[in-house]
């Protein structure tokens, strides 16, 4: 099965998902979101961002979540499958072959 992951645009990345895992993808998407919400501080899925005011003073600094479709696929492979079951593939000729769509 082909899964397309988009980021609030029609464009996206395509992934192969073995048929036996297709029904669990939406559940895993929820678990991945819960995992992201639990992250605090420095982590591979975060990036430190500062806001500097017009006088050059730091108003605040914070870690923000920074992740993508590849991170979701890697999380599935490590946390759920213990193997490389889901992986990125080239875009199909058209989206008619896409069976599952996820927007981040």
Image (cartoon, grey):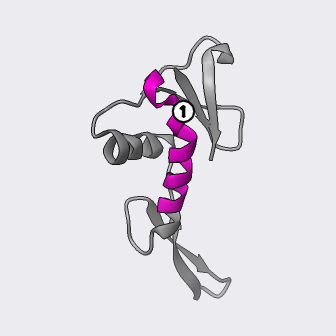
Q: Residue at 40%, 42% (x, y): give it.
A: 76
Report helix, strand or loop for mark 1. Answer: helix
- Residue 34, placed above or below residue 57: above
Is residue 38 visible in the rendered image? The answer is yes
Tell me residue 87's x, y (percent).
40, 29
Q: Sort mark 1 into few (<14), some (14-19) or many (20+) by Cα contacts within 10 Å.
A: few
Q: Residue at 38%, 71% (x, y): give it.
A: 42
Specify whether residue 31 is painted magenta. yes
Q: Is residue 19 left or right of residue 11?
A: left
Is residue 65 visible in the rendered image? The answer is no
Give the magenta-colored segment's residue range: 19-35
Tell me residue 44's x, y (percent).
37, 59
Name the residue that disc number 1 marks. Answer: 23
Q: Residue at 40%, 31% (x, y): give it.
A: 86
Q: Nearer the viewer, residue 89 or 78?
A: 78
Specify whether residue 15 is painted magenta. no
Q: Residue at 46%, 45% (x, y): give it.
A: 72
């Amino acid at each position: 099965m082909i899964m397309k992951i988009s980021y609030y645009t029609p464009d996206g990345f395509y992934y192969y998902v073995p048929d036996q895992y297709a029904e669990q993808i939406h559940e895993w998407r929820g678990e991945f979101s819960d995992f992201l919400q639990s992250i605090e501080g420095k982590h591979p899925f975060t990036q430190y961002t500062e806001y500097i005011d017009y006088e050059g003073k730091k108003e605040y600094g914070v870690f923000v979540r920074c992740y993508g479709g590849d991170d979701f696929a890697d999380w599935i492979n490590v946390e759920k499958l213990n193997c490389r079951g889901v992986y990125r593939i080239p875009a199909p000729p058209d989206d008619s072959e896409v069976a599952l769509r996820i927007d981040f």
